[in-house]
Amino acid sequence: MSFQNPAYFWLLLLLIPIIVWYIVEMRKADASLQISGTDSFKGQPKSVRIYMLHLPFLLRVAALLLLTIGLARPQLTDHWHSEQTEGIDIMMALDISGTMQAEDLRPNRLEAAKIVSVEFINARVNDNIGLVVFAGESFTQCPLTTDHAVLINLFNSVKFGMIQDGTAIGLGIANAVNRMKDSPTKSKVIILLTDGSNNAGDIDPLTAAKIANQFGIRIYAIGVGSRGQARIPYQTPIGVQYATISGEFDEQTLRQVADQTGGEYFRATDNASLKRIYEQIDQMEKTKIRVREISKKQENFSPFILWAMLLLLCEITLRGFVLRTIAQ
């Protein structure tokens, strides 16, 4: 409930002198009678009129209070809220080449990427999300879907050795573009995660980025790997051995891929920075929600005025008939 004219509540301050005046007048009006003793009056029941003596004044105060509320014009407000949600199409292009086994991220680059990606997917409730994986070749692990439980299961099943080794970044981008180019959704995004330089496939990354730009698709490129050297495990007849690889790769190409499509390039050197990058992308690519609010106000002063009139009528009736005094 709201009030159209709340300034009228200042009138309630007038009740203070009215109450003071009433108390003073009641003390002046006390009648006295000299008698020899009061023993004979002990135990006598009090008249109902004694208990009702102050009722007319209380009714008047209540009536003035209700009249003031009525003058302030209380209003009831009804709200209608409607919203339309437009999700975003997001294809995640994930590098699963052998170098993603490097352990500069824990437990390794690929597993760290999977963990953070699943957290990202869980936060994007209204979006269509799909998964493309690439190494020496590329294929679609999951098409665009809002069934994120299925997507996460397919995400978790990604592992090394699913396809021929290599780093076909251009094919990964092209495959992702092909999966979303015909979608009617206005906002389309590719999140490209890789730790290498393009060394396989029939299409180079910059050409694939130009195609993505023609279809209005933004690419956020994430380069994974510490700045320095990293250990990578490999199997030998005597067990798992480790080799050292450089953490440097073709960042310039990844930056150009992102710039051509209006996206952005990021470098993740550890688990914490990778998580921050996904959080930053999540903030930049917000689901569009159109909200329409309608409000309707309804005047609600009449009940207060009617009750005030009724109380004043009760006061007049009590003073004129039930509690009438000799002076009247």
Image: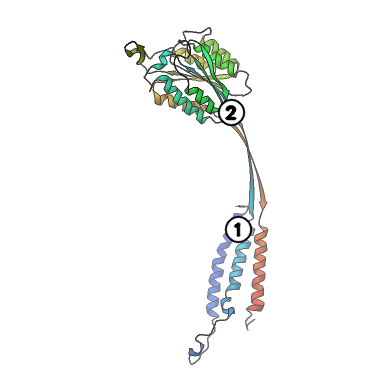
Give the quadrant of the C terminus.
bottom right
SS assignment at label 2: loop
Q: Could you tell me the amino acid type at mark 2?
A: Gly
Is residue 175 visible to us here? Answer: yes
Report whether residue 277 is seen: no
Please state which of the two labelled residues, at mark 1 or mark 2, is closer to the viewer: 2
Is 4 drawn above or below residue 235 in the view shown?
below
Is 117 located above or below residue 44 in the figure?
Answer: above
Residue positioned most to the front:
237
Question: Which label is found at residue 8?
Answer: 1
Residue at image x 65%, y 65%?
308
- State the residue at coordinates (50%, 11%): 137
Q: Is residue 72 above or below residue 172?
A: below
Left or right? Give the position of 305 relative to 253. Answer: right
Residue lying farthest to the top in this orientation = 202
Q: Residue furthest left?
A: 238
Label 1, label 2: how many angstroms apart (C-alpha)? 49 Å
The residue labelled by disc 2 is 87
The answer to which image quadrant residue 54 occupies is bottom right
- Quarter assignment of residue 67: bottom right
Q: Amino acid at mark 1?
A: Tyr
Q: Residues within 10 Å of mark 2 (few under 14, many from 20)?
A: many
Q: Position of residue 5 (x, y in %)?
A: 62, 54
Nearer-N-terminus badge (1/2): 1
Q: Left or right of 140: which side holds 246?
A: left
Residue visible at 55% across and 31% down in the picture: 125
